Image (cartoon, coloured by chain):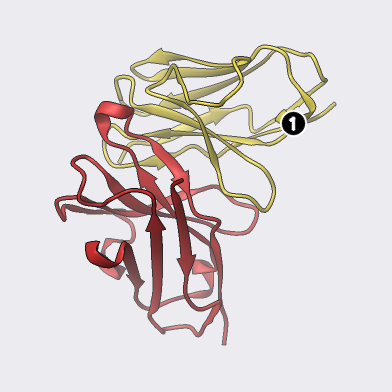
Chain colours: A yellow, B red
Amino acid sequence: DIQMTQSPSTLSASVGDRVTITCRASQTISSWLAWYQQKPGKAPKLLIYKASSLESGVPSRFSGSGSGTEFTLTISSLQPDDFATYYCQQYNSYWTFGQGTKVEIK
Amino acid sequence: QITLKESGPTLVKPTQTLTLTCTFSGFSLSTSGVGVGWIRQPPGKALEWLALIYWDDDKHYSSSLKSRLTITKDTSKNQVVLTMTNMDPVDTATYYCARRRAAAAGGAFDIWGQGTMVTVSS
């Protein structure tokens, strides 16, 4: 099974900060990686698919990059609505989620 | 508008079998490349993929839970059903169903249901 490791587990940041979350796969997954945002009590929301494609309706401050085993999600200027937990997910071989990164207010 | 909604019991006893139904609208599970998956999330923990069924009835299961899971579809009713046998308190979680978009369109889980909380307790 492919394992996904996110870092950091928790990130404290302020509105306006540039935020970067990293996701590493235990073996190569090409670009078959997605990023989701989840708020308490809500279902996950797709932000990025195929490592760098922005889902329709998602603000352009979100971007994704990487291929192979190393990926990043960047929020260029953190907004109040962005405080949430973020998950990466590989779908090269079945489906595996990372353990999540909680972005909290500094 | 595409929607998915999970339904099933909120409380099951240990050793019982859980049956969850995902009823969807706005897309067809007959469309090439489309799938519906189940994902769960224990309270305060991460998401865990459980199973997925494709438009052509191809089925995939989590390796750690494969012996306990069965996924089926009823295309005419726009429903996908997940059964999980021998439930244990560690299976207490919110269970989500989600549409898996065709690979040509990106292949991720693009639309999710609201989730249904299942508690396993005697």
| Viewer-side residue, B66 vs A91 | A91
Looking at the image, residue A103 lies above or below residue A63? below
Q: Identify the residue under disc 1.
A: A81
Residue A20 is situated, as x and y percent measured from the top left of the image, at 62, 17
Please state if B39 lies on the left or on the right of A44 as rendered: left
Identity of the residue drawn at 48% across and 83% down = B14
Please state if B55 lies on the left or on the right of B63 as rendered: left
Please state if B49 lies on the left or on the right of B89 as rendered: left
Residue B104: name its quadrant: top left
Quadrant of the image containing the N terminus of chain A: top left
Identity of the residue drawn at 82% across and 20% down = A14
Q: Can residue A104 be seen from the camera position used here?
A: yes
Picture mark count? 1
**Amino acid at dot 1:** Asp
Q: Secondary structure at mark 1?
A: helix
Dot 1 alpha-carbon crowd within 10 angstroms: few under 14, some 14 to 19, many 20 or more: few
Quadrant of the image containing the C terminus of chain A: top right
Identity of the residue drawn at 79% across and 28% down = A80
Residue A64 is situated, as x and y percent measured from the top left of the image, at 50, 16
Looking at the image, residue B95 lies above or below residue B55? below
- Name, please, the residue furthest toward the right: A106
| Viewer-side residue, A106 vs A42 | A42
Looking at the image, residue A44 lies above or below residue B37? above
Please state if B83 lies on the left or on the right of A6 as rendered: left
Q: Can residue B72 be seen from the camera position used here?
A: no
Identity of the residue drawn at 57% across and 49% down = A43
Instruction: Name the chain letter of the residue that bears numbered label 1.
Output: A
Residue B100 is situated, as x and y percent measured from the top left of the image, at 34, 43
Residue B101 is situated, as x and y percent measured from the top left of the image, at 33, 38
- Name, please, the residue furthest toward the bottom: B122
